[in-house]
Image (cartoon, helix red, strand yellow):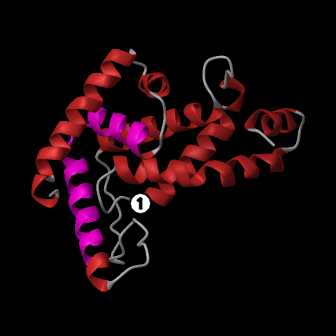
């Protein structure tokens, strides 16, 4: 069942159907939030806020303008930007666990992978918000350049420029890891 069918059920009074949308999109929303906020931020709370906002503003969703996923990731992006602007105290995650799942492999592979993820996270944090957003949405979430442009409310050319600058900065930051 597609998002449109679920949205029709919600509009028909089936409020529980929104849970299906949450299940379908929660990983993407969490990845975007986690990658746009600094390490230590309480990403789970902000991701929940994104879904609450989406639910309360569901009437403003216009399927002719964008897919539900694009609209939802726009809300996530804006929530992250607002959190960064407020510079509110961010809760720290003391678990020490990487936010990236480890693939099975040798212990040496796991260490190399963990180092790469740590360095990538640090490099992403150094990017300006607009470049980081373009990179996360296009490269990590797989949105098309047009969809990223809708989320960012900028032309595709601007998305390409931001994405190119982000890639170059990340390439330079991680140059010693790439052989």
- Counting every numbered tag in the picture gives 1
Residue farthest along the front direction in this orientation: 179
The C terminus sits in image quarter: bottom left
Q: Residue at 74% of width from left, 52% of height from top?
A: 19
The N terminus sits in image quarter: top right
Q: Is residue 98 above or below residue 129?
A: below
Q: Residue at 41% of width from left, 37% of height from top?
A: 138
Q: Residue at 33% of width from left, 16% of height from top?
A: 157
The one of 62 and 118 positioned closer to us in this rendering: 118
| Secondary structure category for the residue under label 1 | loop
Residue 7 part of the magenta-drawn span: no
Q: For the magenta stretch, what is the residue range? A: 111-139
Dot 1 corresponds to which residue? 42
Residue 46 lies, in percent from the top left, at 48, 51
Residue 133 part of the magenta-drawn span: yes
Residue 124 lies, in percent from the top left, at 25, 48
């Amino acid at each position: 069942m597609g998002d449109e069918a679920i949205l029709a059920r919600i509009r028909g009074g089936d409020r529980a159907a929104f849970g299906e949308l949450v299940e379908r999109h929660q990983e993407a929303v969490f990845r975007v939030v986690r990658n746009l906020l600094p390490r230590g931020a309480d990403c789970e709370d902000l991701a929940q806020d994104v879904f609450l906002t989406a639910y309360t503003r569901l009437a403003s969703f216009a399927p002719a303008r964008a897919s539900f996923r694009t609209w939802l990731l726009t809300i996530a992006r804006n929530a992250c930007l607002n959190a960064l602007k407020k510079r509110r105290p961010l809760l720290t995650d003391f678990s020490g666990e990487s936010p990236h799942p480890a693939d099975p492999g040798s212990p040496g592979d796991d260490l190399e992978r963990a180092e790469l993820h740590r360095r990538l996270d640090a490099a992403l944090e150094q990017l300006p918000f607009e470049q980081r957003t373009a990179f996360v949405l296009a490269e990590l979430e797989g949105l098309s350049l047009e969809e990223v442009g809708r989320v960012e409310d900028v032309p595709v050319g601007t998305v390409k420029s931001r994405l190119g600058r982000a890639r170059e900065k990340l390439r330079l930051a991680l140059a010693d890891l790439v052989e």
